[in-house]
Amino acid sequence: MPRNHLIILPCHGIWKIDSASDDNNYGQLSDQWYLAPFQLEGNDHLVFIKQSLKAIEELLLDYENSVILFSGSQTKIDAGPISEAQSYFLLMKKLVNLATTKDGFEQLTSLFDIEIRILLENIVKQLESNNISVNTLFSNGYINTEEYALDSFDNLLYSILRFKEITQWYPKHITIIGFGFKESRFLNCHARALDIPKDIIRYISYEPEPLNYSQEQLNRYFENLIYMEKKNALGLFENDWYARKNSLTKKKNGRNPYKRIARYDGLKMFHFNETELTDSEHFKKYVEGKMPWSYKEW
């Protein structure tokens, strides 16, 4: 029976693999990552780890039917030609492998908070109950990478097309694990623009976690986060469904120092090279009811 559940983990940074031989580098410190300045305040790097472990936990709940795709390209010139997706994959393999030993688990619990400890505990229990080794988990295609995505629209679309490459089928169920403030962007913009039925896609949210903030400071932090999301992403995608206009293409080009170009066969069915139509006209002509996953009106 073919696998039909796609679990997408949109990546947002690059773990410093060049220092992975350091026994103390488990991604627990911000300087063990290539991050943008705005990602420091909310301890985003720790949220990346929680999101990734949650994806593995979800996979193991439906192991025979699911595939995780870490999605993210080679976005940081200082990191060299290592993709966000590769770095997440390798970090998760390092963490889970260590967690399966008693001493290793104790070491990790001394570095991370209780939420990460619980996720690791659940993963280890699921591996044991299903008689799955860490090597099998990470080497049989159930956890894989998508290495061309440069924004959230790409994360969703390219992961679907990559899933097709791996399984020969399109997914019947999609789970996205990401930041809560991006949920509307994924479900109300991207999924709608791709004609993905509402009842086959779900979103699991994790938010940034500023430390030692008062409630008032937290309120201001998240209010600003939502404002910036609307200004710099959601608002732009609402007016550029397929990220073809200057504002979004400029951002994507800035994240593509190694000039990666996605060449998934499935891109042809979207006719993105035809730019004379408005987004809604393009959707009506080429997308609505015409995708392999289309079967209901929104």
Image (tube, rainbow, N blue to C red):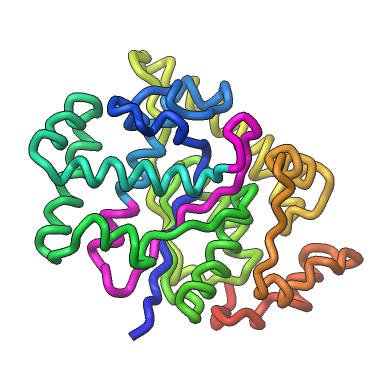
Q: Quadrant of residue 47?
A: top left
Identify which residue, 214 or 99, lies in the foreground.
99
Above or below, 75 relative to 224: below
Residue in the image at 37% along x and 31% along y: 27
Toward the right, the furthest residue is: 276
Identify which residue, 47 or 255, lies in the foreground.
255
Residue in the image at 58% along x and 50% along y: 185
Left or right side of 190 for 249 = right
Residue in the image at 34% along x and 27% along y: 22
Toward the bottom, the furthest residue is: 1
171 magenta-colored: no
Above or below, 103 relative to 138: above
Q: Quadrant of the C terminus?
A: bottom right
Q: Residue 105 at x, y = what percent? A: 15, 36
Q: Quadrant of residue 292?
A: bottom right
Q: Quadrant of the N terminus?
A: bottom left
Identify which residue, 61 or 210, lies in the foreground.
61
Toward the front, the furthest residue is: 21
Q: Residue 82 at x, y = what percent? A: 55, 43
Residue in the image at 34% along x and 67% along y: 140
Left or right side of 125 for 144 = right
How many dots with numbers?
0
> Which residues make up the magenta segment?
55-81
Q: Residue 263 at x, y = what percent? A: 69, 66
Q: Quadrant of residue 203?
A: bottom left
60 magenta-colored: yes
Q: Residue 235 at x, y = what percent? A: 69, 43
